[in-house]
Amino acid sequence: MVEYLDFDIQAAYNEVKERAEAAPVTSKDAWDEMVDDYITERLEVGELNKDDDTDNMIEDLKNMWAEYEKNLNIR
């Protein structure tokens, strides 16, 4: 995982996880879409900018699906 100067990947994961639980998100595709929406939102409000390495941020967050999936109760 990449280390970011002004972006806390764990805090971002926690926020995406919270949203995913509320939705609820139960598939990798839905998780990936939520991650894309989250980063787009951060860009729109100015918390991130085009110079930030958003591609790696997105990749890192999408790769956290396995962590989120461990806590799902899908039958």
Image: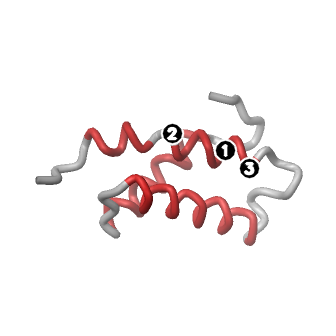
Quarter the N terminus occupies: top right
Q: Amino acid at mark 1?
A: Met
Tell whether 25 sits left or right of 15. Answer: left
Mark 3, residue position: 54
Alpha carbon distance from label 3 to label 1 = 5 Å
Residue 3, numbered label? none
**Residue at the spot 78% in from the left edge and 65% down from the top edge:** 46
Tell whether 69 sits left or right of 75. Answer: right
Alpha carbon distance from label 3 to label 2 = 14 Å
User: Mark 2 Cα within 10 Å, few/some/many (few <14, many 20+)?
Assistant: some
Does label 1 or label 2 sit earlier along the sequence? 1
**Residue at the spot 46% in from the left edge and 40% down from the top edge:** 64
Mark 1, residue position: 57
Q: Amino acid at mark 2?
A: Asn
**Residue at the spot 68% in from the left edge and 63% down from the top edge:** 42
Q: Quadrant of residue 70?
A: top left
Alpha carbon distance from label 1 to label 2 = 10 Å
Which residue reaches farthest front? 29
Residue 63, numbered label? 2
User: Mark 3 Cα within 10 Å, few/some/many (few <14, many 20+)?
Assistant: some
Residue 56 horizontal/vertical position (percent):
70, 41
Asked if residue 40 is positioned above or below residue 32 in the image, the reply reads: below
Tell whether 55 sits left or right of 36. Answer: right
Tag 3 near tag 1, CB within 8 Å: yes
Which residue reaches farthest right? 51
Does label 3 or label 2 sit earlier along the sequence? 3
> In the structure shown, which secondary structural element does the residue marked by tag 2 occupy?
loop
**Residue at the spot 70% in from the left edge and 29% down from the top edge:** 3
